Image (cartoon, rainbow, N blue to C red):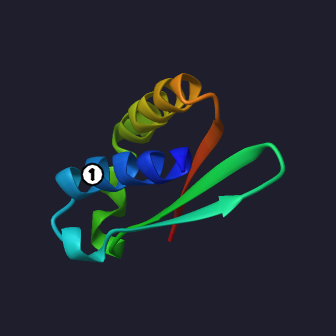
Amino acid sequence: MPSDSLKELIEYLARALVDHPDQVAVAEVSGEQTVVLELRVAKEDLGKVIGKQGRTVKAMRAFLSAASSKLRVRADLEILE
C-alpha cells in the first residue's frame, strides 16, 4: 500500500531529528480522499520537530507532498502533543 511508504518516510525523518527516537509514533488515518499521518513525539522533542517558525515541519510536509504526488495519493501531516 502506498501510504505505508509515506508513513515510513515521516517516521524516518522524525527519528533523525529527535533525542528520543524510540518515542516517535506515526499513525495513519485514511479518509475518503486524503491520508492523514499523525506524528507523536516526546514532549521535549516537540520543538525540534516543529523548528523555528515551523520551518522543519514545513520541510517535512514538502517531502510528504512530493512523495505522495509521485504515488498519486493525497496526504497531510499533523503533529499531535
User: What percent of the width, then of the height, locates residue 51?
Assistant: 34, 43
* Circle 1 residue: 12
Front residue of 60/28: it is 28
* Image height of 30 relative to 33, above or below: below
On the question of residue 48 being in view, the answer is no
Q: Quadrant of residue 45?
A: bottom left
* Image height of 52 relative to 40, above or below: above
On the question of residue 47 being in view, the answer is yes
Q: How many marks?
A: 1
* Image height of 50 relative to 63, above or below: below
Front residue of 38/49: it is 38
Q: Residues within 10 Å of mark 1 (few under 14, many from 20)?
A: few
Apparent side of residue 78 relative to residue 12 in the rendered image (left or right):
right
Q: Furthest residue to the front?
A: 1
Q: Quadrant of residue 72?
A: top right
User: What percent of the width, then of the height, locates residue 24?
Assistant: 33, 69
Amino acid beneath label 1? Tyr
Q: Quadrant of residue 38?
A: bottom right
Q: Quick one: SS at disc 1?
A: helix
Q: Residue at x 55, y 30 (%)?
A: 71
User: What percent of the width, then of the height, locates residue 6?
Assistant: 46, 45
Q: Residue at x 48, y 35 (%)?
A: 64
User: What percent of the width, then of the height, locates residue 55?
Assistant: 39, 33
